[in-house]
Amino acid sequence: MPPSPTVHDPAAPGDDRLADLRTLGEQLPRFMRLVHALKAGQAAEGRDRAALVLLFPLERLGPLRQGALAELVHADPSTVSRHVGSLIEQGLVHRVPDETDGRASRLVVTDAGRAALARFRAEREAHLARVTAAWPTADLATLTTLFGRLLDDLAASLPTEPTVVPVAASPREKS
């Protein structure tokens, strides 16, 4: 009978796994700082990227209540409310009555919102294409797969999962 898979003890002294975990633990904050720096640079250009990011789950999942959207993106409801107001003002999102509760509404991406989302996605993909231009295709595919796996496992480790979970998309469809 083949041995069953084992779960590694991340704290085992002398284990290469511990060194890798420490390195990853140092790389993740660096990654977050770089993402923050990229966002700050885009904000300096006058773009409201934080609001535009809300279009991705709305496009992928369809109409959502504002509270469900805030829960899904792990953001404060007042912040999401402010961003939704901006998206509505720009004509990128509109509210429709919730068919299950006439007092509530759901957010729907407009045609202008889909066009803005396509531009945003194209800009992001062009930037990533420039950054990874010298990478072999296999390396990019490996990173994409493993990074998606890390994100899925990090999301699963959160104390509470959102009530609306995005459907896993292929690497080409991910937002």
Image (cartoon, helix red, strand yellow):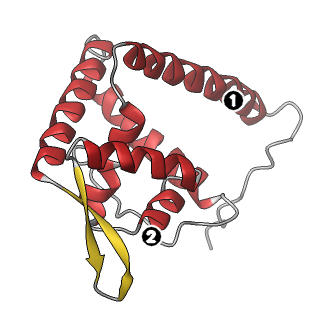
Task: Identify the secondary structure beneath mark 2.
Answer: loop
Instruction: Say if 163 sits above or below 21 in the image.
Output: below
Residue at point 63%, 23% (across, down)? 27
- Residue 5 occupies quadrant: bottom right
Vertical arrangement, residue 89 with respect to residue 36, above or below:
below
**Which image quadrant is residue 3 in?**
bottom right
Question: Quarter of the image containing the N terminus?
Answer: bottom right
> Real-space Cα distance between discs 1 and 2?
33 Å
Three-letter code, disc 2: Val
Q: Which residue is mark 2?
A: 164
Q: Nearer the viewer, residue 24 or 109?
A: 109
Residue at horizontal 24 percent and vertical 53 percent from the top:
93
Q: Secondary structure at mark 1?
A: helix
Comparing marks 1 and 2, which lies closer to the viewer? Answer: 2
Disc on the earlier residue, 1 or 2: 1
Rendered location of residue 101, percent (x, y) = 38, 87
Q: Which residue is mark 1?
A: 20
